[in-house]
Amino acid sequence: MVGHGHEHVRVAVIGAGIGGLGVAVRLRRAGVTDFVVLERRDSVGGTWRDNSYPGCACDVPSLLYSFSFATDFDWPRTFSGQEHIRAYLEKVTDTFGLRPHIRFDSEVLSARWDTGALRWEIETGHGTLTADMLVSATGPLSDPKIPDIPGLGGFTGKVFHTARWDHGYDLRGKRVAMVGTGASAVQIVPSIQPLVDRLTVFQRTPPWVVPRMDREMTAAERRLYARVPLARTLRRWALWRVRELQVSAFTRHPARLGVLEKIARRHMAKVVEDPVLRAALTPGYRIGCKRILFSDTYYPALVRPNVDLVASGLKEVRGNTLVAADGTEAEVDAVVFGTGFHVTDMPIAQRITGADGITMAEAWKDGVEVLRGSTVAGFPNLMTIIGPNTALGNSSMILMIEAQLNYLDDYLGWLGRLSAGQGGRAALDARREAVRSWTGHIQRRLRRTVWNTGGCASWYLDANGRNTTMWPGTTGEFARVTRHVDLTEYEVLRVPARP
């Protein structure tokens, strides 16, 4: 298949995370074997390989956070940790025979559409190749973001992002700063608090935190799920159905989330007795506007004697002293940034050049526009997995991925039929009017959601304040609108067969 020179494949997939592995399985099951998965690192797993920080776990139940075609995994907990999810993805890779298709240490440096040949020219660290179709499955949580803090370059201690955890650095007895209070931080803080000498948490905006209710799977449950697959299927269905019923509160009736706010307030009040600390930890926006966090251990860790909460955010660094916006100072030995990822400005968009000779990032300079979360005008035969406006606030992203796999399957079917019908090669390019119509439809629906009306600034919004991240409906609805490719939304491009 691939050496270090040049080759041509039917499909090239960028990334061997959950999305990329899902694409690979679907291709294999559809009888497509002429494909490669280009992975920049040395193993599969994507975000579940990169995020190996202490306490890393999923906030979606294990039985739902798995592929529908690979549910027979012996999950040890109701909400599984990173090591178990990574083991699951390794098992999927082996069970479906994906390793021969994966090219590790093969970062995609550029991908350029060849209009004359109707194919993608791809340059990687291990040479070049061409492909009829390119699938970008890099995901939105793949490239860490560290803010530009004045003076950080002069800090002589240890600095790293949560997604690039330095396991060779021993935190025991150290003075550590945790910058950020997002999903990673609420897992890290309780995990490292007993080890460090002092932990200073720099909080810019407090999160809403609700009980996690995680537990070990009982031996009886594990035996039942192993011996009676229907029981596992029914439990998975029930978990999915409950989350589908919750969607309307996020998307159409945010006031209903007040019940959840009361639960979160009681959850905090049980542990945080200090009224000043409680006030600092109480959000001033509607629950759900930012990502809701699940933890039973975050608040107990914050009230420990060796933990300080700085509620005004990090402003600058002076030597080894961190200075908050309110002037609070903390001298530390290590700084851990839990400051998120490049979600609305994904770096891969700078490396993909379309039919008009401009990159995807340039095409999106005035705002991201994508058809059904999957295809982009001017970028024929390109599909994004977990593309813009496909993220969820309450359910499993794997459900969205599987919906897009159906769309990909139909897309490839159309390419095959169009090519066979007249000979030569065919490509599909999303019509700009179809993309604009879909984008306008999604943005109108988002106006009344809690993500747009909840009174917060979140990573769901781009630099212009537009929500280019969240899906304003149920996973069932997304599956319906991506079940088939509507050919009227595409321009058909052809290259005739050579005589």
Image (cartoon, rainbow, N blue to C red):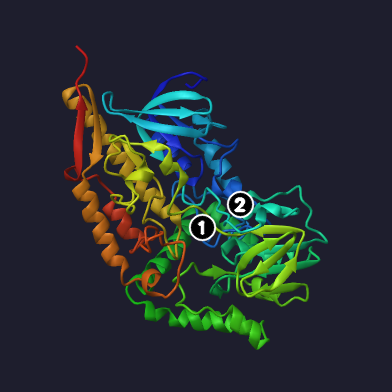
Please name the residue shown 24% across and 44% down the image: 485
Q: Which residue is mark 1?
A: 63
Horizontally, residue 153 falls left or right of residue 378, namely right
As drawn, 449 above or below 337: below
Picture coordinates of residue 49, whole percent (x, y): 60, 46
Horizontally, residue 498 falls left or right of residue 161, namely left
Please name the residue shown 40% across and 69% down the image: 451
User: SS class of the residue under badge 2?
Assistant: helix
Q: Earlier in the sequence, mark 1 or mark 2?
A: 1
Nearest-to-viewer mark from 1 and 2: 2
Identify which amino acid the numbered label 1 is placed on.
Leu
Picture coordinates of residue 301, whole percent (x, y): 70, 72
Given residues 71 and 286, the one toward you in this image is 286
As drawn, 98 above or below 69: above
Q: Which residue is mark 2?
A: 163
Horizontally, residue 483 falls left or right of residue 31, namely left
Picture coordinates of residue 283, whole percent (x, y): 52, 78
* Residue at mark 1 to residue at mark 2: CA–CA distance: 25 Å
Horizontally, residue 100 falls left or right of residue 157, namely left
Please name the residue shown 51% across and 44% down the image: 17
Mark carried by residue 476: none
